Amino acid sequence: MSEKLMWDRLELADLSVITVLEEMYANCIEFYVIGGSKVIEKANQTNRVSEFILMGLSSRPEDQKPLFVLFLTMYLVTITGNLLIILAIRSEPQLHTPMYFFVSFLSFIDICFSTTIVPKMIVNFLSEKKTISYAGCLTQMYFTYALGTTDSCLLAVMAFDRYVAICDPFHYVTVMSHHRCVLLVAFCCSFSLLHSLLHTLLLTLLNFCDTKVIHHFLCHINTLLRMSCSSTFLNELVIMTEGPIALVTPFLCIVFSYIQILIVVLKIRSAAGLRKALSTCGSHLTVVTIFYGSIFSDLKPLSSCNASAPVAAVVYTVLSSMLNPFIYSLRNEDMKRGLQKLVGRRKS
């Protein structure tokens, strides 16, 4: 009797152990399914795309080769023209003045500006996979905005140089000393690098989820903000507050300088003096009109889609850099003589 009771107790113990194991297994399965799905969901929320697709100027296959030839030619002309300007200014002692110092640095910035954008652009024209990595996109955006802002600040400095030369010629050598010119250029570069770094760092805080297609030929900050699946409030706030300082302030300095120049020029009696004053300002005004005209046409609210943005971007990133050497050489007798001497020296 005692032996039977013992076997009954063993059977009950086995059943309870099996029941406990089954409950533990069910709980483990539930924990794995629920907990695992939460981890995956959280990972998906914080995931960033590894690359973007740059759609370029046209998605039609028949347009790719003509665009490749066009922009390759423009890029080569840009590099050649700006290098000639730099070499002519460096090799000709008569061009060692503050104005031409700024022109040579502007040519250097234009070379860097085009090189940041055009090589990737022309490669994509012939590539089926028009991708750019996440890091590559942020790097391109950083240098694009840094060099573009440097261009803007440098044009303001050049306007100030013309203002001093025409409105206060007796103190020009003192005010625009070589040391001060170097400091002005250093300030333009430092401010532009910090300005671009701020926007790039803020962009790294955003998530892009599954959105990869950029309807542009470069990584444009407005396009990237529209693609983000996280809040862009801070980015937009900085653009609306700090952005005008980097763009509008140099433009206002240019306007103020030329208003003062115009007042002085209207008082000049001699035709020769008037012609000389206008010749030194004409080239700079042409460059300012092209650069700022295209940039202001590119400024649109983030909520609106600007279909003409790529065309405007071509003007201030590619076309402006290509035309600057022609504008400064064809409308300037001193620069013409410098280029002629440079070419003559190379031939001999």
Image: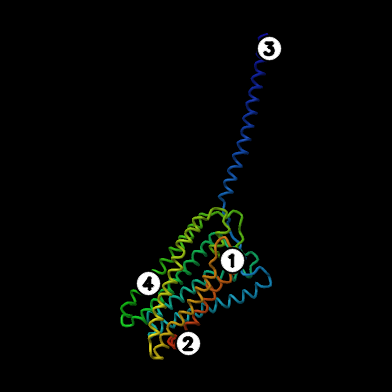
Question: Which residue carries the number 3 mark?
Answer: 4
Name which of mark 2 and mark 4 comes first in the sequence: 4
Q: CA distance from mark 1 to mark 4?
A: 35 Å
Name which of mark 4 and mark 3 comes first in the sequence: 3
Question: Which residue carries the number 2 mark?
Answer: 343
Q: Nearer the viewer, residue 271 or 181?
A: 271
Q: Label 2 amino acid?
A: Val
Q: Label 4 amino acid?
A: Leu
Q: Residue at x 62, y 74 (%)?
A: 67
Q: Nearer the viewer, residue 9 or 63?
A: 63
Question: Which residue carries the number 1 mark?
Answer: 306
The label nearer to you, 4 versus 3, is: 4
Q: Position of residue 274 (x, y in %)?
A: 41, 88
Question: Which residue carries the number 4 mark?
Answer: 184
The label nearer to you, 1 versus 3, is: 1
Q: CA distance from mark 2 to mark 4?
A: 31 Å
